[in-house]
Amino acid sequence: MSSAATTTLQAPPVPPELVRLPLITNNRSPGWISDQVAAIVEGKTPTWWWAAFVPSVIMLGLLGLMLAWQISTGVGVWGNNHPVMWGWDIINFVWWIGIGHAGTLISAILFLLRQRWRTAVNRAAEAMTIFAVMCAGIYPALHVGRVWWDWWLFPIPNSNAIWPQFRSPLMWDVFAVSTYFTVSAVFWYVGLVPDLAVMRDRAKTKLRQILYGIFALGWTGSNRHWSNYEKAYLILAGLSTPLVLSVHSIVSLDFAVSQVPGWHTTIFPPYFVAGAIFSGFGMVLTLLVPLRKLCHLEDIITMRHIDIMCKVTLATGSIVGYAYIMELFIAWYSGSPYERYAFMNRLAGPYAWGYWIMMGCNVIIPQLFWFKSLRQNLKFVWIMSILVNIGMWFERFVIIVISLHRDFIPANWGYFKPTWVDICTYMGTFGLFFTLFLLFLRFLPMIAVAEVKGVTPHADPHTPEGGAKGGH
Amino acid sequence: MSTPANTYGLLAEFDTPADIMHAAAKVRDAGYKHWDVFTPYPIHGMDRAMGLKNSVVGWFSFIGGVTGYTTGMLLIWFTNAYDYPIVIGGKPMFSPFSAFPPAYELTILFGAFGAVFGMLFLNRLPRLHHPLFKAKRFALATHDKYFLVIETSDPKYSEAETRKLIEAAGSTRIEMVED
């Protein structure tokens, strides 16, 4: 074929607005990625780390004191009382477990959807999931009142020869949350194995070499291993996807299966899952917006990543907004006076301030993310991410407290107030969360090194950077 | 030149994913059996270049999932309908619907265990010691270099022939690794 014919067959140049932004900016090489991520672990402990760690540990101590006080005295130290028998304990349980869901969404669902940008944020988001589920787990374990009988929740043979009864959604919850924690931890660890091998191979001290070496399980990077590994990872992603959807669905069934007006609705499972992802992305942004700067990871967690996460927040926030409006419609359409009253009481009752904080933070304010200039403004994004989590906390407050405080008989009505123990326990869970998260940052690679290397142009054997002659 | 008895194999280093993939295709076509490629991240297309079959991890996961579902259903039936039946709110002693959520969670739990432990079993991990860890350059296999190893135990292995094959494939550095 003549050279003239070849030129006529060439594809037209791609217009600049259609060119995808690179996932790693400044064309960083695989070696640079290892060095940059490992530097966070290998370098000197930065001042900001101590500035965050010391208050976190103090708060963790506060949690320990509060739990000891609660266990030794009784659940009465919390504000829960008739008619609001579920108060801050279940609000915070649902809130923390919801935060965890963004980690699984990023690690599993986006993996199945081939969203390659997830590699930059999945490790930190999965760590967030695990620590958030730990914080969540404290509440159901403690709210039973007699913690030493918690093992009755599991089907373990006991001297009374009785078993848990599985017709209650609360038992489903035990299985859902414990499976969720286990599978999230396993998924996270499997993802960590190749990166622990990275840390082992560059370790300068014997201790690091031995510890990273043991936990890396002897990973060599063999392609025969990668082949099984990638399949296992795909299966874990495939299993975690229905898992994360089922966990918050089952959490919502704790409410929806009951008869309480405001709880007894079929929209709860999808609405809870969307809300969970919404709040989880809020927390991911709260953590990563400062961290990308503090850890000098701007080339890995790029502005494009922030932009995409803001869009997910906008989308899930809008789904949640739709659910709020649909709830109101169904309450009116049901014709049930109790349903109608429950929702009028939300809009204009004694806790209406909570409802309007929820509406403002979850539905109205996130709409500002339609503007690209605001999605690119890091200070704005960070403040928004916190407002999202305040809004989602109030969503659970609205569902739990407002529904319970006035149900069928006015003689049963009451007004719930948290006690100082409620407030300090909640603050303490932040101590637990941030202590664990900061330890994770300091001792484990916070970016999935092997995965990020795999999405660079250097990793593609068909591009000039991957070594192909003339672009193959 | 004969190969000493205590050598593990020939370790060849490459600089780019394209180079190692072409080398792997050559080694595959030459008919070697005991050889492997070591890369910092999975390279797309390498399984085909090495002639590997689809991984069987899925079967471990499947068996795990079936076990989990069966365990869940039998556990709930045994505890609530057989060993200690007790009427709660007029609900049936056993219903596949109320038993489904816990059984579903156990399906996922055991399926995940099947995938992870199946993967570790197929890879023969954990294995904390490996002859290749003795090679100093091999630490770069998790950094930014790409390695190909042909073991001396391979029936087709011969010091001169194998070295020539790897050199022709464009390796930048070749060394012998002790067992």
Image: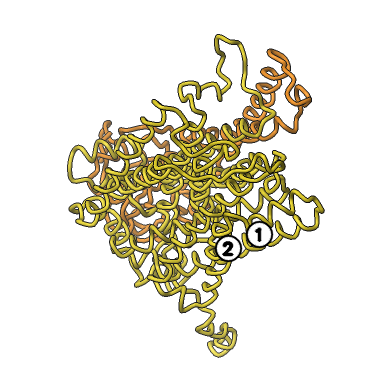
Chain colours: A yellow, B orange
Q: Residue at x 35, y 54 (%)?
A: B146
Please rate how many residues cluster around mark 1, counting C-alpha atoms within 10 Å: few if below 14, some from 14 to 19, many from 20: some
Front residue of this view, candidates A427 and A404: A404
Q: Amino acid at mark 2?
A: Met
Residue closest to the far top: A159
Tell me the kind of residue under disc 1. Answer: Tyr
Residue drawn at (55%, 75%) of the image: A370
Residue A176: x, y in percent?
A: 58, 36
- Quarter occupied by the N terminus of chain A: bottom right
- Residue A159, horizontal then vertical, whole percent: 55, 9
Please state the horizontal and vertical placement of residue A443, each as a whole percent of the image.
28, 45
Q: At numbered mark 1, what does the secondary structure look like: helix, strand or loop? A: helix
Q: Which mark is residue A324?
A: 1
Cα–Cα span, label 2 and label 1: 8 Å
User: Which residue lies under the disc numbered 2?
Assistant: A359
- Residue at left offset 57%, top offset 82%: A11
B56 sits to left or right of A148: right
* Residue drawn where x is 66% and y is 27% of the image: A166
Residue contact at pointers 2 and 1, CB within 8 angstroms: yes
Q: Secondary structure at mark 2?
A: helix
**Nearer to the camera, B68 or B176:** B68
Q: Is residue A190 visible?
A: no
Say whether residue B103 is visible. yes
